[in-house]
Image (tube, grey):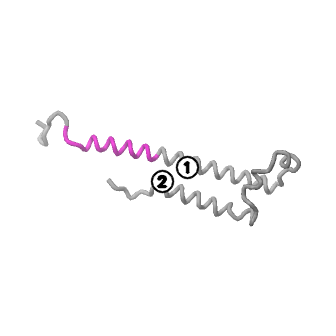
Amino acid sequence: MPSDRPDPSDFLAMAQRMLRELFGDAHGDDEPWAEATRSARESRTREPSAEQQRENLTFALATRAVEALEDLALNVAAIRQRLERTSTRTDGPPADGDDATGQ
């Protein structure tokens, strides 16, 4: 039974694309993961600026939000499948040989 509801995977792809656009140009031409892959010694010598901390927190929160939305989409898909299975069972042929007259 086809449905006119949007596919959860389309929604998640759009959310990830929006996050990439939002955070993609934040570092300009620098390697985006350079900050995360620095050695521990380098990271101890210099504290991130308030702007960098805010950006890191925003990115972490956005990432958690997308993960939560993915979990929600999976739960909705599971519920939808369960409902479709139960509606197929109740819409099927009558049990115990009953006919349309109820005899």
Residue under label 1, please give it. 69
The secondary structure making up most of the magenta span is helix
> Of all residues shown, which one is farthest toward the top?
96
Kind of residue sitting beneath label 1: Leu
Q: How many marks?
A: 2
Q: Nearer the viewer, residue 24 or 80?
A: 24
Marks 2 and 1 sit apart, C-alpha to C-alpha, by: 9 Å
Q: Quadrant of the C terminus?
A: top left
Magenta span covers which residues? 76-94
- Residue 76 at what x, y percent from top left? 46, 46
Residue 84, numbered label: none
- Specify whether residue 41 is painted magenta: no
- Specify whether residue 83 is painted magenta: yes
Q: Is residue 76 left or right of residue 103?
A: right
* Position above or below: 89 against 18: above
Residue 8, numbered label: 2
Mark toward the start of the polypeptide (2 vs 1): 2
- Residue 28 at what x, y percent from top left? 74, 66
Asked which secondary structure carries label 1, the reply is helix
Q: Residue at x 87, y 50 (%)?
A: 46
- Residue 83 at what x, y percent from top left? 37, 43
Q: Are marks 2 and 1 in contact (CB under 8 Å)?
A: no
Asked which secondary structure carries label 2, the reply is helix
- Residue 74 at what x, y percent from top left? 49, 46
Mark 1 is surrounded, within 10 Å at the Cα level, by few (under 14), some (14 to 19) or many (20 or more) other residues, namely: some
Q: Residue at x 59, y 51 (%)?
A: 66
Q: Is residue 58 left or right of residue 95?
A: right
Kind of residue sitting beneath label 2: Pro
Q: Residue at x 57, y 57 (%)?
A: 15
Mark 2 is surrounded, within 10 Å at the Cα level, by few (under 14), some (14 to 19) or many (20 or more) other residues, namely: some
